[in-house]
Amino acid sequence: MDIVEEILKQNRLALSKGITAVENEYDNAVDIMTKIYTHTGHAYVIGITGPPGAGKSTLTDKIAKEFRKRGKTVGIVAIDPTSPYSGGAILGDRIRMMDLMMDSGIFIRSMATRGSLGGLSQKAGDAVKLMDAFGMDIILVETVGVGQSEVDIVKTADTTMVVVIPGMGDDIQAIKAGILEIGDLLTINKADREGADKLNIEMEMMLELNNEKNAGWRPPINRTIASKDQGTEAVVDSILAHRDFLMKTGKLDDIRKARIKSEVTDMVNVRVNRYIDKNVVRTAEFDETIEKLQRRETEPYSVVDNIVSKVLK
């Protein structure tokens, strides 16, 4: 079957095969993404990130259900830790979201971190595009934590929500910068725990200090108890309010333009790095140059200039 044609006809099996092709870099992956691209750009993408144990999966589950109540179809890209045995995603998110899988208006896909970023942000972005072309209205991208790889993956999103929980202690200090940089919405999950009020005040103070950067949008702080499905409606309302703000101010176009620029730049870098690895690094001449450097017979600056000159020719 023609995978692209079937995806556009909303064939779920074809969508699954398309994402598998992209994730595993099959020979037809580039062809699929090339053909699908003109059919993308319609879905609204929401990034959900936060420290491990914050209850992101449960909250994602409830948010998806709330969007379904409002008549929207939902795609979920869940970035899972990698199994040390198979190298694949452990699929914990799919187990927790099992009841969602019976809903034809929801499509869930777990993707493995494979121990490092390793192009995962591009693969997650491609999975989002495939779900977009399939016709999903809303796409949720749920990440493992709040490290650099998660920040890169969240660049795929139009709206980013950071989930935190009371009782993190000094951890809140460690992720302050990340929250202020990437959080359009802040959610305190497990808000029935002791310390929720204190955490709320700390985050309000952080927002005050960062007031200039917010430029017309102050990230709302919502409280949820995802396990009891409490506070989910307010979170979805905040997501939609942020979408409206971005559309009215024209910032949504700016975000998407910056994303495309970043994607193209990353793709160029990957292509150039592969060329250099194949045609420069894996050569006998390069090995000889390294030995000369080790013997201090030359220095790295002129070596790099020489390599760059050859590559640019």
Image (tube, grey):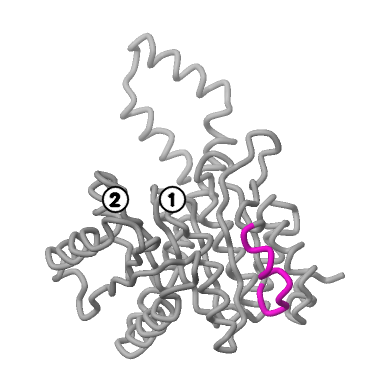
Please give the name of the residue rendered at 75% of the width and 59% of the height, measured from the top-left corner: 28
Callouts 2 and 1 close, C-beta under 8 Å:
no
Q: Can the viewer see residue 108?
A: yes
Which amino acid type is shown beneath numbered disc 2?
Ile
Read off the magenta span.
96-106
Q: Quadrant of the N terminus?
A: bottom right
Q: Which residue is mark 2?
A: 175
Q: Which residue is mark 1?
A: 145
Is the residue 24 above or below the residue 126 in the image?
above
Is the residue 61 above or below the residue 94 in the image?
below
Residue 147 picture location, percent across and down: 39, 47
Please give the name of the residue rendered at 65% of the width and 58% of the height, measured from the top-left corner: 94
- Crowding around mark 2 (Cα neighbors within 10 Å: few <14, some 14 to 19, many 20+) is some
Please give the name of the residue rendered at 66% of the width and 70% of the height, measured from the top-left corner: 100
Is the residue 174 above or below the residue 18 in the image?
above
Residue occupying the far top of the picture: 295
